[in-house]
Image (cartoon, rainbow, N blue to C red):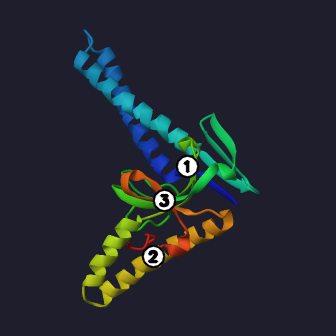
């Protein structure tokens, strides 16, 4: 089992171009401030204020261009290699050091990497569903194995709204939400079977409880007590 993820090239390219344009404008302002007699301090401050974030944005874009994340599970060993702009981080752990597969719903305000046609768009606040192989002790060794948009909660909300509405279009939208949830469930069932791991569900007090995937409903929730 092997997963490989590279940087979001379209997003990095857009950030780099905008940063380069801003840096160019800041450089022109800096030269104008330096050429003025008596040094225009206000223009100088404005030029540096523009140059600094643009330079950081360009650096972040280069890091994203060179980013690579590789996860491999060979036999009973989990290895992970992360590299970006000459910085490398890697580890290898026995699979027995991992507790199970945790379902994670979260939101992001920037691009979602490697999502070609996300339902909620590539810009602005978006939600996503992830399956994380949770380490027993060291959270830095958690490994993300699956990610997709939108989150389960977002899908449930959309499904409820469309299911309550009338009309053929609403029924089709509700069906599309159910199909996406089914895809998430299939991914989780496949990973649980391949790794022989339980599902970890967050309960009261953020405590994790182990569940067999077969006992969860279609929305990957434990049965009501």
Front in this rendered view, residue 100 or 117: 100
Please tell me which residue is depicted at 48% across the width and 73% down the height of the picture. Answer: 216
| Residue position for label 1 | 7
Q: Helix, strand, or loop for circle 1? A: loop
Residue 159 rendering spot, x and y as whole percentages? 34, 77
Mark found first going from the N terminus, 2 or 1: 1
Mark 2 in CB contact with mark 3 (< 8 angstroms): no
Q: What separation in Å lies between label 1 and label 3 (alpha carbons)?
A: 34 Å
Please tell me which residue is depicted at 59% across the width and 36% down the height of the picture. Answer: 85
Label 2 neighbourhood size at 10 Å, few (<14), some (14-19), many (20+)?
few
Tell me the quarter of the image containing the C terminus: bottom left
Label 1 neighbourhood size at 10 Å, few (<14), some (14-19), many (20+)?
some
Visible residue check, residue 143: no
Q: Answer left or right for 18 relative to 200.
A: left
Residue 86 falls in which quadrant of the image? Answer: top right
Front in this rendered view, residue 132 or 25: 132
Q: Residue furthest bottom?
A: 168
Q: Residue furthest top?
A: 38
Residue 104 rendering spot, x and y as whole percentages? 45, 58
Q: Residue furthest right?
A: 75
Tell me the quarter of the image containing the N terminus: bottom right
Mark found first going from the N terminus, 1 or 3: 1
Q: What separation in Å lies between label 2 and label 1 (alpha carbons)?
A: 35 Å
| Residue position for label 3 | 209
Mark 2 in CB contact with mark 1 (< 8 angstroms): no
Mark found first going from the N terminus, 2 or 3: 3
Tell us which disc is closer to us: 1 or 3.
Answer: 3
**In the rendered image, the vertical position of residue 39 relative to residue 82, given as above or below:** above
| Residue position for label 2 | 217
């Amino acid at each position: 089992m092997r997963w490989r993820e590279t940087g979001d090239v379209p997003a990095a390219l857009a950030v780099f171009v905008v940063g380069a344009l801003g840096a160019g404008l800041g450089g022109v302002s800096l030269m104008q401030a330096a050429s003025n007699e008596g040094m225009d301090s206000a223009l100088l401050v404005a030029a540096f204020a523009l140059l600094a974030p643009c330079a950081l944005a360009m650096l972040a874009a280069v890091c994203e261009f060179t980013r690579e994340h590789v996860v491999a599970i060979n036999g009973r060993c989990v290895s992970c290699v992360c590299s970006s702009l000459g910085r490398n981080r890697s580890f290898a752990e026995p699979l027995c050091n991992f507790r199970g597969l945790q379902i994670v719903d979260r939101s992001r305000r920037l691009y979602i990497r490697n999502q070609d046609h996300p339902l909620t768009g590539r810009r602005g606040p978006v939600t996503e569903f992830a399956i994380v192989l949770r380490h027993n002790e060291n959270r830095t060794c958690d490994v993300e194995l699956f990610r997709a948009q939108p989150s389960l909660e977002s899908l449930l909300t959309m499904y409820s709204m469309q299911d309550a509405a009338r009309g053929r279009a609403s029924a089709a939208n509700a069906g599309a939400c159910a199909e996406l949830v089914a895809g998430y469930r299939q991914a989780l069932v496949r990973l649980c079977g391949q790794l022989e791991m339980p599902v970890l569900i967050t309960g009261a007090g953020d405590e994790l409880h182990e569940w067999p995937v077969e006992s969860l409903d279609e929305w990957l929730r434990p049965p009501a007590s």
